[in-house]
Image (cartoon, rainbow, N blue to C red):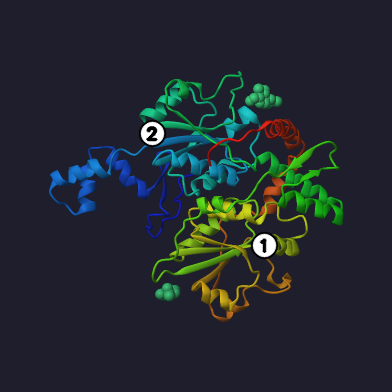
Amino acid sequence: MGSDFGCRDGSEELGWKISTGVFHRSKFLVACLVGAGVTAASVLAIRFGGDKFSSLSSQFLMKNKKPVRVYMDGCFDMMHYGHCNALRQARALGDQLVVGVMSDAEIIANKGPPVTPLNERLLMVGAVKWVDEVIPDAPYAITEEFMHKLFDEYNIDYIIHGDDPCLLPDGTDAYALAKKAGRYKQIKRTEGVSSTDIVGRMLLCVRERSTAENPKQSSLQRQFSHGSQKVEDGVSGSETRVSHFLPTSRRIVQFSNGKGPGHDARIVYIDGAFDLFHAGHVEILRLARELGDFLLVGIHSDQTISSTRGAHRPIMNLHERSLSVLACRYVDEVIIGAPWEVSKDMITTFNISLVVHGTVAENREVEKWDSNPYVVPNEMEIHRQLESPLDITTSTIIKRIVSNHEAFQKRNEKKEASERRYYNNKTHVVGD
Ligand SMILES: *[C@@H]1O[C@H](CO)[C@@H](O)[C@H](O)[C@H]1NC(C)=O
Ligand SMILES: *[C@@H]1O[C@H](CO)[C@@H](O)[C@H](O)[C@H]1NC(C)=O
């Protein structure tokens, strides 16, 4: 670690740094400095141009009251839009969100090896637009000592967790101490997605591939990943897996920036499947965003992906993939169901200045494509290939799961049973 998270152009939105084990987004450094008190005057002098101090200090009191800082922790292994939604809800309970990510060793000690190594999990969490700081070595259990560290060193006001019970190995409530201290707030769990469900989809996808593109199974997979229909998984026996995700326009709006490009903005376009959104995606989006002022991401439809990558893909449907991409801080706007070919009309409509794609992709050999999607931008000489910083694809993620097939299946079955109990017994809960 110790790497810089972008911000080479000094752009406020993209500024991420690791300092003394904590990531800071530069936009909030100002607020942190103000919070530190001593430096408040000089910060305000920079901001307001060194006017009379008395008027400044009243402005300081009015405008810059101490921000409410909230803390949420997790493994963020196999991160999905449900985690992003939890982070969004947590951030809404305060002004600044600090996220504790557990180390690999801590996860191994408490629940077995993670699928995603810490460096990738940090990239993923740090790229979520509602996250202000990351603590890269959070403990699995919030001990009294760590809780006081959060309150005293990190200036945390509240510790946040979902409404699902979280028990320590000894059967006690993991958040009991924070609750007792009156510094605990709860958010509603995100319906419709869980890592268990996604692992299930991957296992099904692999099994399906091994049964040589059986058309009946393909349609089963499609139903499974695209609808809320009950699907009997005949291969493994008695399990029933259900995708509970119900895409609403409201959720899309909550995730969206709701802002168009500014005047004279240089618009960069990148397209792809963005299936099982991962650290490789985050890194190429960061590079793409650095080349302009506004990043427009084209997300291919489920049909387009099935036709280029096989009937077992995508694992995540178009709406789910759109949410994951929208949650990324480097992304300004998405096209939900972008065409395979980048047309002249599209370039004109969105005033696209540059079309980019990464060197690492699942179907990277241009010759193998039935049609090169970049013919028009090539002719216009606005097409550029970017060196992908990480060599990770959706297949890499699936392989990680499959290579641990048995262990995950076991872990999954247990969790699935408790998921089933949750859904069978669930009642309406008010909230987002
Ligand atoms: C289109 O993009 C260019 C930058 O590439 C910018 O100079 C121009 O102002 C944009 N046009 C409009 C109408 O915003
Ligand atoms: C279902 O919910 C009720 C009431 O909240 C609770 O008493 C019961 O234990 C729950 N059952 C299961 C199987 O979780």
Task: Report if the CB atoms under discs 2 and 1 are less than 8 Å apart.
Answer: no
Residue 421 coordinates in the image, percent (x, y): 71, 30
Q: CA distance from mark 2 to mark 1?
A: 43 Å
Q: Nearer the viewer, residue 364 or 298?
A: 298
Residue occupying image coordinates x 47% and y 56%: 257
Does 320 appear above or below 9?
A: above
Residue occupying image coordinates x 86% and y 57%: 215
Cβ(mark 2) to ligand 2 < 8 Å?
Answer: no
- At label 2, the amino acid type is Tyr
- At label 1, the amino acid type is Ser
Residue located beneath label 1 in the image: 301
| Ligand 2 image-quadrant field | top right
Residue 359 seen anywhere in this rendered image of the structure: no
Residue 204 coordinates in the image, percent (x, y): 78, 46
Residue 188 coordinates in the image, percent (x, y): 55, 36
Residue located beneath label 2 in the image: 154
Label 1 element class? loop
Residue occupying image coordinates x 82% and y 50%: 208
Q: Nearer the viewer, residue 360 or 242?
A: 242
Q: Earlier in the sequence, mark 2 or mark 1?
A: 2
